[in-house]
């Protein structure tokens, strides 16, 4: 069928050969040239092929090139073992827990090289009580490797030397039809690895591909299997989703398919209140725009946004109970982080930056005396200010506050003096020196 389709579209000259179970699609048909492949990936496939091995660019990169998108990174699959791969390249190291892989480094670029995996034999595989595959590191051949990839669009092999694509699962046709389809029986594949349900949502949102009906159907009844996935893996997947450049789209889809319970347990609570929903929506759209514009994004900033309304609620409860504002804020932050850690496993390394974002927010309200100048000098002022603007835009605080800070940052000294309001904050002891030194600025930060 695929041959007929190509003949019809491209005429007789474009020949799709069959090689065993694979269709071999020539350059004239798919039009992905060797120059679309990164320097490092070409070095890796050339090097391995020169040493007598098979080597192909695989997975997301081939898919993205066919979709006319810029691949994020390039992966290579080969019949060489990790040790054999390492011997071919000067800068290569074997990594991996679940799978053993080789990272080959060329300057800034790292190419991930994996040995063809063996197709999973459900009888023999080591699984948990729910059928999730625990170990899967046996080597196989190219065809088996294709069978254990998740979606047909991700199961294509590109040879940069011949510029041919090897397709075992009609992935090429699916990409042309803009369809994301699971390789094999979707139910079996979700049971082996429930994270594939999240990948289905993320990739279809990110690539604008529709999810094939049979691939989407089992998700509703299988979504609870996500509860058995180790937290660290869920966290990795969530990070990929949030930093995909299509986080808002992904989250909408996750909610529509009710997959977010496993992924972002706090989302329901946050999105229940209109202000929280507005704030999170703005934060996600803002991150998406930054990523699409190739600007750096700090995941901690995004987590600080996702949890902000929880912090606000806890902060208010404590102040209503008579606690002093700053003390109450610190307690509220610790309480929310503790609660989330139990469900979501946000690693502790993000805590410091999240807390910085939160702690600086009340300081924006103080617009008298030396305080605004000191706040401008704080290292993460810019991020905290972006956070403030999102709060203004969501309607949580007065827009005027954001506008004041926008103007104050770039204003002349004279204008700044005019802008400062009467100093109503708690009085500080006078200092001899007019310029606060670095330690004085740090001491200003209400840190416990
Ligand atoms: P992205 O653009 O987000 O990197 P990707 O498809 O390249 O998408 P990776 O996580 O980089 O995703 O994985 C590379 C390839 O490995 C995939 O294209 C797919 O072939 C295979 N793969 C990844 N995760 C799984 C999985 N859970 N089950 C089966 N195959 C997978
Ligand atoms: Mg990838």
Image (cartoon, rainbow, N blue to C red):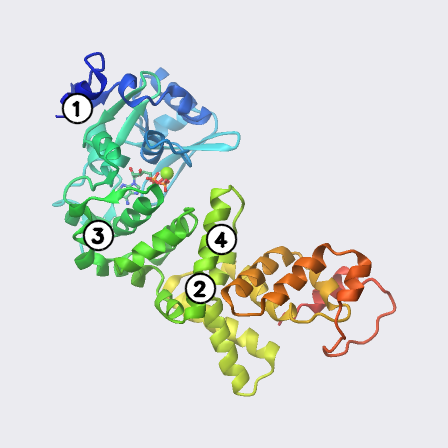
Q: N-terminal of the two: label 1 or label 2?
A: 1
Does the residue tagged 1 have its C-beta within 8 Å of any atom of ligand 1? no
Name the mark nearer the viewer: 3 or 4. 4
Q: N-terminal of the two: label 3 or label 1?
A: 1
Q: Judge by depth and name the residue closer to the eye, 196 or 173.
A: 173
The residue singled out by tag 4 in the image is 286
Does the image show residue 347?
no
The residue singled out by tag 3 in the image is 132
The residue singled out by tag 2 in the image is 278
Q: Residue at x 45, y 53 (%)?
A: 285
The answer to whether the residues at label 3 and label 4 have Cβ atoms under 8 Å apart is no
Quadrant in which residue 98 is drawn: top left
> In the picture, which quadrant includes the C terminus?
bottom right
Q: N-terminal of the two: label 1 or label 4?
A: 1
Where residue 141 appears, as percent x and y from the top left, is 22, 28
The residue singled out by tag 1 in the image is 5
The answer to whether the residues at label 1 and label 4 have Cβ atoms under 8 Å apart is no
Whole-number angstrom distance, CA of label 1 to CA of label 4: 42 Å
Q: Residue at x 34, y 41 (%)?
A: 207
Whole-number angstrom distance, CA of label 1 to CA of label 2: 47 Å
Q: N-terminal of the two: label 3 or label 4?
A: 3
Does the residue tagged 3 have its C-beta within 8 Å of any atom of ligand 1? no
Does the image show residue 430?
yes
Q: Residues within 10 Å of mark 2 (few under 14, many from 20)?
A: some
- Assign a secondary structure to mark 2: helix
The answer to whether the residues at label 3 and label 1 have Cβ atoms under 8 Å apart is no
Q: Residues within 10 Å of mark 1 (few under 14, many from 20)?
A: few
């Amino acid at each position: 069928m695929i041959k007929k389709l190509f003949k019809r579209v491209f005429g007789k000259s474009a020949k799709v050969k069959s090689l065993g179970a694979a269709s071999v699609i020539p350059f004239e048909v798919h039009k992905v040239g060797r120059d679309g492949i990164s320097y490092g990936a070409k070095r890796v496939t050339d090097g391995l092929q020169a040493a007598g091995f098979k080597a192909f660019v695989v997975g997301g990169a081939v898919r993205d090139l066919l979709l006319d998108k810029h691949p994020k990174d390039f992966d290579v699959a080969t019949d060489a073992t990790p040790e054999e791969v390492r011997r071919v390249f000067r800068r290569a190291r074997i990594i991996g827990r679940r799978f053993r892989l080789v990272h080959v480094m060329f300057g800034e670029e790292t190419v991930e090289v994996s040995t063809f995996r063996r197709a999973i034999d459900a009888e023999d595989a080591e699984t948990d009580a729910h059928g999730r595959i625990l170990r899967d590191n046996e080597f196989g051949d190219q065809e088996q490797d294709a069978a254990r990839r998740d979606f047909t669009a991700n199961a294509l092999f590109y040879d940069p030397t011949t510029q041919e694509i090897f397709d075992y699962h009609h992935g090429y046709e699916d990409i042309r039809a803009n369809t994301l389809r699971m390789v094999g029986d979707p139910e079996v594949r979700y049971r082996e690895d429930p994270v594939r349900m999240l990948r289905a949502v993320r990739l279809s949102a990110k690539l604008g591909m529709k999810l094939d009906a049979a691939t989407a159907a089992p998700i509703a009844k299988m979504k609870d299997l996500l509860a058995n996935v180790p937290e660290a893996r869920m966290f990795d997947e969530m990070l990929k989703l949030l930093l995909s450049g299509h986080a808002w789209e992904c989250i909408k889809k996750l909610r529509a398919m009710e997959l977010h319970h496993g992924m972002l347990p706090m989302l329901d609570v946050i999105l229940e209140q209109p202000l929280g929903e507005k704030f999170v929506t703005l934060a996600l759209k803002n991150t998406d725009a930054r990523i699409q514009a190739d600007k750096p994004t700090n995941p901690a900033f995004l987590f600080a946004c996702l949890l902000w309304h929880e912090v606000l609620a806890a902060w208010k409860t404590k102040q209503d109970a008579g606690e002093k504002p700053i003390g109450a804020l610190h307690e509220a932050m610790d309480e929310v982080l503790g609660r989330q850690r139990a469900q979501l496993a946000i690693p502790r390394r993000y805590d410091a930056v999240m807390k910085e974002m939160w702690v600086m927010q009340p300081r924006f309200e103080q617009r008298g005396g030396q305080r605004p100048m000191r706040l401008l000098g704080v290292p993460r002022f810019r991020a905290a200010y972006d956070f403030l603007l999102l709060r203004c835009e969501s309607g949580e605080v007065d827009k005027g506050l954001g506008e004041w800070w926008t103007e104050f940052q770039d204003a002349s000294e004279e204008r700044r003096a005019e802008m400062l309001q009467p100093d109503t904050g708690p009085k500080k002891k006078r200092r001899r020196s007019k310029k606060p030194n670095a330690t004085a600025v740090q001491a200003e930060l209400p840190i416990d």
